[in-house]
Image: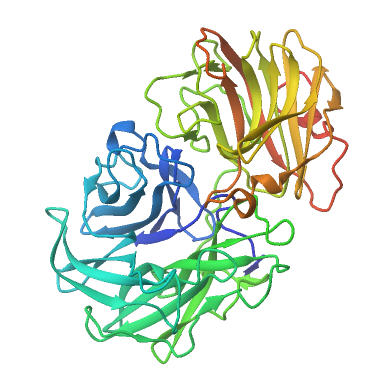
Amino acid sequence: MTRAAEPVLPGFHPDPSICRAGDDFYLVTSTFEWFPGLPVYHSRDLVNWRPIGHALDRPEQLPLDGVPASGGLYAPTLRHHDGTYYLVCTLVDGTDWSGHFVLTAADPAGPWSDAHRLGGAGIDPSLFFDDDGRAWCTGTRPTGRYEGHTEIWLREFDPSALVLTGDEHVIWDGAVKGAIWSEGSHLYKIDGRYHLLTAEGGTAMDHAVMAARADAVTGPYEGNPRNPVLTHRDLGAGHPIVGTGHADLVETPDGEWWMVLLAMRPHHEDRCALGRETFLAPVTWEDGWPVTGGRIEAGGPVPSLPPSPRPAVPVCDQFDGPELGPAWNMLRPPRERWWSLSERPGWLRLRVRPESLADVANPSFAGRRQQHHDFAAFTELDFAPADEEWAGLALVQNNDFHVLLVSTGSGLRLVKREQGIETVLTAGPAVSGPVRLGFEAHGRWYQASYSVEPGTWTPFGDPVDGDILTSQVAGGFTGTYLGLYATANGRASKNHADFAWFEYLPLPSGQEVGGVGDHALHHQGGGA
């Protein structure tokens, strides 16, 4: 059985970490400033993954408030030992505290504990449970010897007290002379030897997976003479998959080895609006070293596990449940309930609040990951705005780079925020009563549209260049989110905006931008 070289978790799912408990596999990825944080996925076949919760789903678990764009939750590691699940991670640029922490749970679906501060320097902590009953933690930190030089440290971990203990050991500082950003370390014991897997080269075009091994957990570690064991750095920016790295290993019950890792799919040049995604690669062993084939390629193998496809996800959210589904995220944890699915049953109501997407705050924005280069997204909005009140659709990279299609007190507006400067690209008439809003994307171009009469869609302005939604232009480490938004732009308000449904559907690739709204005729919101 073969598969295309596609991510197993498309869209913004970087820094994957995986563990197995019996026949079940669990995976977690980084989320930075987004909340709920650290999504946990379940699979039986390593190809089909189902969200089962978030490790951080309560604001009081960890002080994520006020973290800047691409601050927050970096590179978690998920492990299972003696019936307990452990998740270690780093809070970066926190306002109350920053550093490593550990969460525990009896069930990976939750609930997870509050964060226990762990100590240790740097980023990217990982846990390893040895077969002699001892446990260890690794992490990475800069040395200051030259720009980008880092080292991997090791300390013992006490699972009962959830603290680091004992002496520190520096076990690695790169596979080659002059190496930069040796990070994302994971330890394993395989056939009596300790194996260290790291990322190297920076999490962009030069990313790579490196391997080393030792006879003792504290080292010395020798590098694999064939390093890197997987990279696309030599394939150039024109390759459909770039930036492969930050891997974690898992063994199936049948003894197969597989690797989850991050990579990117540019829509042109090196621009990746989808962010870093989670891929799967096979691993074999030769002379005691991991072998991957060196590439993520089309037609690759899949695990010899019984297929376990997940149920199809509806393309249209009707907002008919008691809570938002697991695909929806917010920026930073909410300290007040500004959304409701019950005040107007069958609608998502957002309170119009002073906070905006331009603020380092928790605005009234519910978003989901962009997961395809070519997609259409639509909603129906019922909103009576006053003055500076806005509500509608938003495409978000961060607080200084986003695109809005909003109904305002002055009429419809297509707004671009780039490098912190806000520009109205297109102004239209005011609309009364419900209005339908949409974006259709093909590669780098995003076309806005609106409809006031069922079945009749009107393009709104010229296509927007989506390069501003990529980290290659906007900076940072996240992918594009799109979703529903309301703000009073710094003013107090008692108003609200109601959304009847939200539709997201992938489109065939290779089309030109145009014909916007044709796909909306098939939405499940009713009444098109």
Pick whichever, 424 or 119, lies toward us.
424
Q: Residue 195, position in %: x, y?
A: 33, 79
Question: Can residue 51 be seen in this snapshot?
Answer: yes
Residue at the image point whose x is 36% and y is 38% from the top? 64
Residue at the image point whose x is 28% and y is 37% from the top? 61
How many numbered marks have been drawn onto this rendered protein structure?
0
Q: Residue 482, position in %: x, y?
A: 62, 36
Residue at the image point whose x is 51% and y is 62% from the top? 306
Q: Is residue 275 above or below residue 314?
A: below
User: In the rendered view, does 377 fall on the left or right side of 136?
Assistant: right
Q: Residue 19, position in %: x, y?
A: 36, 61
Question: Can residue 252 be seen in this snapshot?
Answer: no
Q: Residue 419, position in %: x, y?
A: 62, 41
Where's the C terminus, which quadrant?
top right
Pick whichever, 193 or 166, lies toward us.
166
Q: Quadrant of residue 520?
A: top right
Pick whichever, 203 or 79, lies toward us.
203
